[in-house]
Amino acid sequence: AQKITQTQPGMFVQEKEAVTLDCTYDTSDPSYGLFWYKQPSSGEMIFLIYQGSYDQQNATEGRYSLNFQKARKSANLVISASQLGDSAMYFCAMRAGLASGTYKYIFGTGTRLKVLA
Amino acid sequence: EPEVTQTPSHQVTQMGQEVILRCVPISNHLYFYWYRQILGQKVEFLVSFYNNEISEKSEIFDDQFSVERPDGSNFTLKIRSTKLEDSAMYFCASSVGPGGIDTQYFGPGTRLTVL
């Protein structure tokens, strides 16, 4: 079975500081993708960053980086230099490879981040 | 930049009525999905669609739900007889391919309210 766990229901961070949002996953498929999405209060799901299970390097996209530790099955999102506009719900998601015979995303329960001025 | 679009943004309906939620996926994408998010809860998979047929569906996607790609651009979700518990945000998503490396791009969602 595949599972995504986000253990932090809420986080606070001071503006301009870095913050790490935790995500652990479980799958028996050797090929999978890990994704982070941002959901602001307006409700849309905004794709932030992707990490493939075979990628050697940690993914980075601007101020977002993914701290991928395969042996620990963790894929934590790091936001550097937090901005007020980063206040939102953040979801970690996994998509197993074709060997699992499934195309769907499995989502975690999300972490609500609040950036303080 | 291409994006997934959804209409309407908000739909209010009476219990027992049929609703159709519409989506226009990104034009070169081949795989389409519906997810829902009950207020304050996590995003749940409903169904995936490829080559004009359902590839996979969840337990939520019962006989009250159906999907269709009526033309080359639209992808619809129909709920035949809505229940109060169908009130949720419904997201359409699309991807180029099916595998783990293929990012799914989400539309802005349709908020469905069943009274």
Image (cartoon, helix red, strand yellow):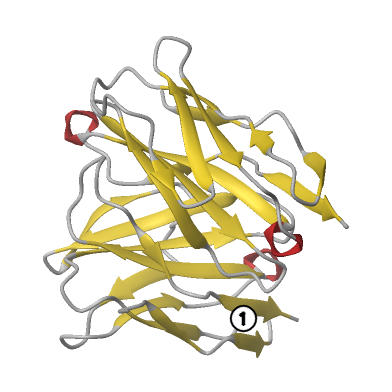
Camera-nearest residue between B112 and B107: B107
Residue at image coords 57%, 30% = A23
Placement of B107 over or under B105, stated as above or below: below
Q: For mark 1, name the chain.
A: B
Left or right, A65 with reference to A114: left
Q: Position of residue B50 (x, y in %)?
A: 17, 62
Camera-nearest residue between A51 and B51: A51
Residue at image coords 62%, 77% = B111
The crowd level at tag 1 (other Cα within 10 Å; few <14, some 14-19, many 20+) is some
Placement of A74 over or under A43, stated as above or below: above
Q: What is the quadrant of the C terminus of chain B in the image?
A: bottom right
- Give, as a three-letter code, the residue at label 1: Gly
In the figure, residue B94 lies in which quadrant? bottom left
Residue at image coords 74%, 33% = A8
Camera-nearest residue between A56 and B115: A56
Q: Which residue is mark 1?
A: B16
Q: Position of residue B64 (x, y in %)?
A: 46, 68
Placement of A62 over or under A109, stated as above or below: below
Q: Position of residue A109 (x, y in %)?
A: 64, 41
| Identity of the residue furthest to the right in this view | A117
Left or right, A87 with reference to B64: right
Left or right, A4 with reference to A7: left
In the figure, residue A33 lies in which quadrant? top left
| Identity of the residue furthest to the top in this view | A71
Q: Position of residue B103 (x, y in %)?
A: 31, 53
Question: Could you say whether the residue bearing mark 1 is in a helix, strand or loop?
Answer: loop
Left or right, A99 with reference to A75: left
Q: What is the quadrant of the N terminus of chain B in the image?
A: bottom left
